[in-house]
Image (tube, rainbow, N blue to C red):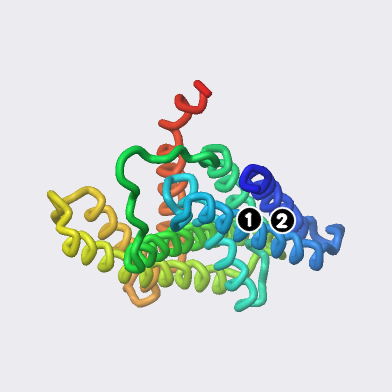
Amino acid sequence: MLQPLAVALPAGYLVSALLHGMAFGGVRAPHVIRERVWVLRLTLLAHLLWFWAMGDALQSFPVVDIATTVSAVVLTSTFLYAFLARSVKHAGSGGVVLGLAALLQLSASAFVNLHPEPRLGPPTPPLGGAQILHVSLSVIATASLLLSGVHGMLYLVLFRLMKQRSFGPVFEHLPDLDLLARMTRGAALVGFLCLTVGMNIGIYLAHREQRPGFNYRETEVVLSILVWIYFGVIAFSSRIKGFSARRASLAAALGLVVLLLSTFLLFFPRLAFHSNL
C-alpha cells in the first residue's frame, strides 16, 4: 500500500492544483468546482491513509525523518489552506498552494524509505505524548510559514499588477490586497503560536531528559528563536509602526524562499545514496 500511495499522492496534488488553476483562464475557463473539491478530498484521504500505513509499518509515530516530515507539512498545509479558503470564502490561491504541495510531496515520495530495516541493538522507546506534541506543533508551524509565504508572494504579485494597471484573469481571480494581507498575517500568527508552545515543550524535554551539552546557544535553539521572532514580526506587523502590509508580505515571501531552499538542501545529501541502489 505504501508504494502505490507514494506514487499517487504527488499526482493527486498536481491534478488538484491544475483544477484550481483553471480559474485563471477567465471566462473561458471550464467550470470544475465540484471536480476540484472531490479530487482534493480524495487526495487528502489518500494522504491520511498513507500516514496510517506508515505508522502501522513502523509501529510508531509516522513522522520519523526528513521525507515523512516534509510529507506531513504538505498534508497539514493543505488542510490549513482548505480551512482558510472556506473561512474567507475565496479559493483563489489554491492553484499556487497545491502546486507547491505537489512539488514538495514529489520530493518526499522520492526519498522516503518505504522498507525500513530493523535497527540493531535495543529497540527505540516509542515517543511520548510531549514529544509527539512537539513534533506536531513544529509541523503545523512550518506549514503555516509556507502558507504565509505563498499569500505574501501573491500580495506582491497583485500589488505589481495594480501598479502596471494589468487587470487580466490573474488579477480578477486572486483575493484582494486586504484579504491577502490578512491571510499572510493570520497564517504567520498560527505559526507563531505553535512555535511558542512547541519550542517551550522542546526546551522542557531537553531539561527533563538532561540532554548532554544542551544550552541556549545551540544552533537549533538559536534558529528556533529567530524563526519565532520572524513569525511574530509578520503576525503583528499591523501594529508595528512603519511595517506595512507590503513589507510583511515581502518578509513572508523571503521566509518561504529560505524554507524551500533549506528543504531541498536537506534532501541533497541523500542523492548519492539513492544513485547506488
Identify the residue at horizontal 27%, vertical 62% (top origin). Answer: 202
> In the image, is residue 29 above or below residue 116?
below
Q: Which residue is mark 2?
A: 16
> In the image, is residue 78 above or below residue 11?
below
Identify the residue at horizontal 41%, vertical 31% (top origin). Answer: 269
Residue 39 shown left or right of residue 125 in the figure: right
As drawn, the residue found furthest toward the top would be 276
Name the amino acid, label 2: Ser
Asked if labels 2 and 1 touch by Cβ distance under 8 angstroms, the answer is yes
Residue 98 badge: 1
186 or 2, nearer to the observer: 2
Quarter of the view holding residue 36 = bottom right
Rate crowding at label 2 as few (under 14), some (14 to 19) or many (20 or more) other CA atoms within 10 Å.
Answer: many
From this viewpoint, is residue 221 visible? Answer: yes
Q: Position of residue 203 (x, y in %)?
A: 22, 63
**How many numbered callouts?**
2
Name the amino acid, label 1: Leu
Residue 74 badge: none
Identify the residue at horizontal 61%, vertical 61% (top origin). Answer: 162
Q: Position of residue 5 (x, y in %)?
A: 66, 48
